[in-house]
Image: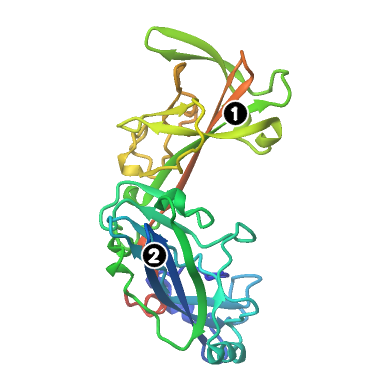
Amino acid sequence: MIGAGALTIRTHFANTLTGMFAGPEPVISSIRYTLEIEVQGKRYTATSVVQTYVYEKSEWAFEIGQKYVYRHRGEGLGIRLDDGRAIAVKLRSLKTPPDYKPYDKDVVLRFASEQKSFPIDLRPVGSGPPQAVVFDDAVAPSQGWRFDWLHPERTLGRGARIARFDMTPTRDPPTFDLGKAVPRVVVDRRKNRQQMIPGDEDVWFGFDAVRARLKNPNPLDETKEVVLSEETHQTKWVDATDRFSGGGMWSLVTEVEPIDVRYSSDFGTITLLVDDKPTVAPTLFVQRERVKRRNPANPVEQWAPIVCILHTGCADILPRPSGLSKTTGALIDPATEDVYIARGDAFTTANTEFQKDEIAEMNGRPH
């Protein structure tokens, strides 16, 4: 995977880091990535070249267990569809061919001379497929989805398919034109260069949900009674958030099935749609700057909406007295022993996840 053993570089560390490198000049390699997708009968193509510099570290370098330091120049992939939507593939998640050794000059030269293309494995094995995001708009998105490589039709529509996704070692220089297709992902939105964490506009939250059956009808530990309120009536259920937000929760249930989730207009409430449907929509993500904040002073606050069960009622089960919030909530219907689990998810879209020039950064030059 690109980025293995990478160390985050900041400009003010440039002089110190120079002393980490020992021995000969870095081994420099390039890989061209090509993605072709078909949406509504039209084929779209994106290509990018990522260049990797591999330095052998000096003996005193502090990164224990890593013999080499990797630095990258280039970008991920981006496609803008005719309807304005966009797909962006993150740089760091791109793969390298089998048996490719970017630190071995002879191997790099051999692969580059062969000009052979290798298909990218999109199955969820090992480190998984490359990370990609679908936006509702390439310039100013307000909604996003994780891209499902094995089922592109879920986010791109019926009939969408991956026609080609491969990588080819090359001698070409790195590319820096991702912004032509997806301007949003190459803009640096940090307030200053010292900002280390993504801002609210680059943190995206979403919730999905499942319905399941308890394997054991006996009472569970770490549960409590909770009242679900809806307009004129109330219903007593069981709050199992503490029990289901830890490890091993799936061993407690069987017959797990996904259900749809609906967000309120102010994102203060999510509703689990318990009505049976043949298909469930992919998880919708929205920026943290749009969700209802409980503690605006907390720069890393998680989204903690009120959780509702359709036609039953709502309960505020995610916040905790500590001021923190759970990202997974669970409610049990005592009449049926059905468990409804709402799971929070998040991804980030800082420009450095899509486009980097770490050689320029190392030399104190902004890209």
Q: What residue would you read off at disc 2?
A: 352
Locate residue 33, reporting x and y percent. Answer: 46, 74
Rounded to the nearest angstrom, the CA distance separating label 2 from label 1 is 35 Å
Q: Would residue 311 be found to the left or right of residue 201 on screen?
A: right
Q: Residues within 10 Å of mark 2 (few under 14, many from 20)?
A: some
Let me know if residue 228 appears in the view: yes
Image height of 175 relative to 264, above or below: below
Q: What residue would you read off at disc 1?
A: 242
Say if mark 2 contacts mark 1, CB within 8 Å: no
Q: Residue at the location (63% across, 76% down)?
A: 98
Q: Would residue 184 be found to the left or right of residue 102 on screen?
A: left
User: Residue 357 falls in which quadrant of the image?
Assistant: bottom left
Locate residue 270, reporting x and y percent. Answer: 41, 29
Q: Residue 48: which numbered mark, if any? A: none
Image height of 39 relative to 45, above or below: above
Amino acid under label 1? Asp
Q: Foreground residue, 172 or 14?
A: 172
Locate residue 76, reporting x and y percent. Answer: 42, 68
User: Residue 361 falls in which quadrant of the image?
Assistant: bottom left
Let me know if residue 197 appears in the view: no
Q: Give the mark nearer the N terminus: 2 vs 1.
A: 1
Q: Which residue sits furthest top?
A: 232
Image height of 214 relative to 144, above or below: above
Q: Is label 2 in a helix, a strand or a loop?
A: helix
Q: Which residue sits furthest front?
A: 41
Locate residue 124, reporting x and y percent. Answer: 60, 57
Q: Residue at the location (47% across, 67% down)?
A: 163
